Image (tube, grey):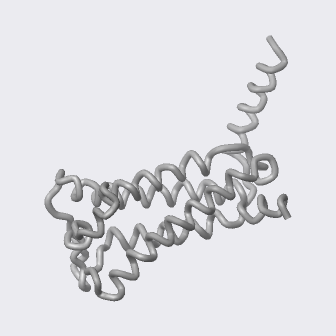
Amino acid sequence: MSIRRLTREHEATQYRSDLRDAGNPEMEHRRYIVGASLIGMATMVPVTLLQAGIVRHLPDPPFGAFNSDKTILSKSAFRFGVPDGALALASLALNVPLALYGQSDRPRRQPIVPMLLAAKTLVDAIGAGFNFWKMASKHEPWCAYCVIGALVNFSLVGLTLPQARQAGQLFA
């Protein structure tokens, strides 16, 4: 057995151990990123189904000024040539491998990954914030799925910043 293969096997064993068992705050944040991203994906699945014409109506909460269908099917939801629900779903899905990539010391060993993830989640949160503003300013009705998606995107920024700060200190 070659040294290279032994090294790869040791790294894989260490990575698996870090991912599953490490109790440090960095790994906990990465697990929360995965969980929050999956919650966000779950809210974007029905949005995408409606936008693709697979379902014809989504239920709304029985209170407030919600009309999710109208917001989800608005012209602005299709402004990029692909439904925004599908884009959000894909973007949230991308968070999962980015959060899981690398061992627990990745801010030191692979600083670009946490910095890219934080930048990506910030861009996502800006887009979600714009959509939230459109609902709050009454340009579009409230959409329960969009509100949950925005909250998830805002929380992801907070979850990704600590590792990005750590990684950024290496460049300072």
Identity of the residue drawn at 74% across and 25% down: 9
Q: Is residue 81 left or right of residue 33?
A: left
Which residue is farthest left?
A: 56
- Left or right of 50 in this view: 127: right
Q: Nearer the viewer, residue 83 or 44?
A: 83
Q: For residue 169, which quarter of the picture? A: bottom right
Position of 36 with respect to 164 (left or right) is left
| Image location of residue 83, percent across then percent down | 30, 58
Name the residue located 76 percent from the left edge and 32 percent from the top edge.
Answer: 11
How far from the left and from the top, in percent, is residue 34? Answer: 54, 54
Residue at image coords 57%, 58%: 33
Position of residue 145 relative to residue 1, above or below, is below
Q: Place residue 118 in its image quadrant.
A: bottom right
- Quadrant of residue 18 within the rendered picture: top right
Task: Give the image location of residue 115, x and y in percent.
Answer: 68, 58
Residue 24 x/y as whole percent = 75, 56
Horizontally, residue 127 falls left or right of residue 166, namely: left
Decide: is 89 above or below 128: above
Q: Residue at 75% x, 52% y: name it.
A: 111
Using the image as rendered, state which of residue 36 and residue 98 is in the foreground: 98
